Image: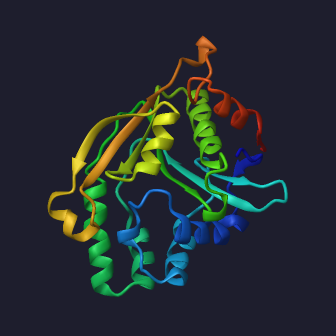
Amino acid sequence: MVTAVNIRPLADADRRIAAHIYAVGFLDEEVRPLMPRHVDRAEGIFAELIQPGPNSWVAASDAGEVVAVALCQEPPWPPPSVVSWSIYRRHLPVVATARARLVAQYLYRVRFTEDALYLQSLVVAPEWQRQGVGHALVRFVCREAQARGYARVTLNAVVGNEPAHRLYEHLGFSKVQTTPAGFYRHLVGWEGVDSMEKRLQSAQGGAPVGGEGSAAETEVALSTRVEP
């Protein structure tokens, strides 16, 4: 099933609903070990961490409901700031904050090249999954990266998260390396993180970005409208 969505920059008014989507419907599970199990508390953290900017987008239904969020990062990729940790500390006990810091140290061991736009996270509300919304957002990110002159889009996916891997592989991403969790496995519960990338055609080449042009993907692309 393919659903029409409007992709636009994330606005300040979207932060609360975006935080809720993150808390209940994170597509990859990389961030869950950093978050409290209580949804309301997790929403509070996300509401402060998610900020409008040139690398934050939402997908909205025709009725205006925000149904998905994509956050990207341009190089260089700095580790979490002192401000980020103060946000965690406001919502978490000391021990949980320390645990989140250790998990972040593991995640930031994964590095990408300077010619890549990093898709930091893609989140679709549970009731909107399997309707082409994730495909539409990834394709949009690829086109945005191409327009900015990047040679590739990169991302992380937890080892064993098959739905995420299928989504990204369908859209032309391939695994380039695996970073084993090692000691951190006891904290995060995963075997490791797969780094994936999609190489983009040169903008001057005029070739489409975001997949090989299957019927399903073309339908998603045509049903996606981008708002300024």
Quarter of the view holding residue 186: bottom left
In-front residue for pair 186/58? 186
* Outermost top residue: 205
Q: Does residue 28 sit above or below 207 in this rendering?
A: below
Quarter of the view holding residue 19: bottom right
Q: Residue at x 44, y 84 (%)?
A: 90
* Outermost left residue: 183
* Outermost front residue: 1
In-front residue for pair 167/184? 167
Q: Residue at x 72, y 61 (%)?
A: 66
- The answer to whether 52 appears left or right of 195 in the picture is right
Image coordinates for residue 139, horizontal then vertical, percent: 61, 36
* Outermost bottom residue: 93
- The answer to whether 56 appears left or right of 14 in the picture is left
Q: Does residue 33 sit above or below 95 in this rendering?
A: above
Image coordinates for residue 93, horizontal then vertical, percent: 35, 87
Quarter of the view holding residue 50: bottom right
Image coordinates for residue 76, horizontal then vertical, percent: 39, 43
Q: Does residue 37 sit above or below 176 in this rendering?
A: below
Q: Residue at x 61, y 16 (%)?
A: 207
- The answer to whether 174 appears left or right of 73 in the picture is left
Question: How many numbered tags mark residues here?
Answer: 0
Q: Does residue 122 sit above or below 187 in this rendering?
A: above
- The answer to whether 57 appears left or right of 118 in the picture is right
Which of the image's four quarters has the C terminus?
top right
Image coordinates for residue 97, horizontal then vertical, percent: 33, 78
